[in-house]
Image: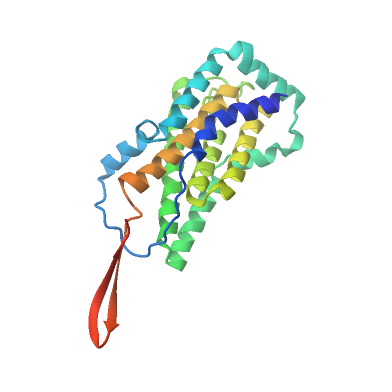
Amino acid sequence: MLIKLFILTTAIVCSTAFAQTHTSKQSPKFVQLTDSPTPWERFKKNLFSPITTPAKYAFWPGMTLTVVLAKAEDSYSDPVQTEMWEKNPLRNSTFIGNFWGTMIPNATYYLAMKSSYWFGDNYNSHVRANHMAEATLYTLGVITALKLTIREPRPNRLDNLSFPSGHAGMSFVFATIVAEEHGKAWGIPAYMMAAFVSATRLNDNWHYTHDVIAGATLGIAYGYGIYYNRKHVFKENDYVIVAPIVCNNTLGLGVSKSF
């Protein structure tokens, strides 16, 4: 019953991630056309992307749910976590979640996409790799700042870095990027794994319910917010192809531009 409640709660946070339209992706090989923003402009737009882009439709409900669960810590959040830890429903499978919540899958995706760009000349893979790197680092940075500021004790009392969950954040930002870049066929399993990661953090006595909801919310919000900025604000998929054309003994140039 507790696992069902947790999955239902997690679904509320991430449901809007699939409400976005998944457009077909192009694979340009040449330089983009738009002027690059300054590093400071890029930093500001990405930092606040959870509230300035359509990611806000996941961010605000998720943060509201986090506050509600934190306020109900004694009556709901703590008892749910304690009961799950005592019953240990996930048994020995939690090591999978512990691994998946690290940055290793994120880094593996980054290297795979970069390799596709380096060796296959696939510009879209380059964009995807940078998307994963940026979204992961912003999520990690904000979560770390909150941990060091709030300093909530963990359920196991090993340290004061419980809120929010870094494992939930890393797994949900990964899932969001996979969903946006590769569609639901890959995104749904990635979200399911992210929910499992979050459940393992309760099962292993590392986090409370509101910790993992907050981490999941930040992962989704930065994953989609930065994706939106790259596509619609920075327009990093815009490109131009210039190629020589020979027709009827006439030499010319052909120009193709993405829109």
- Left or right for 41, reference 28: left
Residue 134, picture quadrant: top left
- Left or right for 52, reference 25: left
Question: Considering depth in this image, is 171 or 55 the residue closer to the camera?
Answer: 55
Residue 146, picture quadrant: top left
- Left or right for 119, reference 206: left
Instruction: In the displayed orientation, state which residue is furthest to the bottom.
Output: 249
Does residue 11 appear in the picture of this structure? Answer: yes
Quadrant location of the N terminus in the rendered image: top right
Instruction: In the displayed orientation, state which residue is furthest to the front.
Output: 248
Q: How many marks?
A: 0
Query: In the image, is residue 57 above or below residue 234?
Result: above
Quadrant location of the C terminus in the rendered image: bottom left
Is the image coloured rainbow, by chain, by secondary structure, or in one colour?
Answer: rainbow
Q: Looking at the picture, how far across and down is residue 256, in whole percent?
A: 30, 66
Q: Looking at the picture, how far across and down is residue 72, in whole percent?
A: 57, 13
Q: Looking at the picture, how far across and down is residue 154, in whole percent?
A: 59, 22
Q: Looking at the picture, how far across and down is residue 95, in whole percent?
A: 68, 39
Query: In the image, is residue 230 above or below residue 169?
Result: below
Could you tell me which residue is drawn at 24 percent across and 52 percent down? 35
Could you tell me which residue is drawn at 24 percent across and 75 percent down? 253
Residue 121, picture quadrant: bottom left
Could you tell me which residue is drawn at 40 percent across and 35 percent down? 54
Does residue 205 appear in the picture of this structure? Answer: no
Question: Considering depth in this image, is 57 or 178 the residue closer to the camera?
Answer: 57
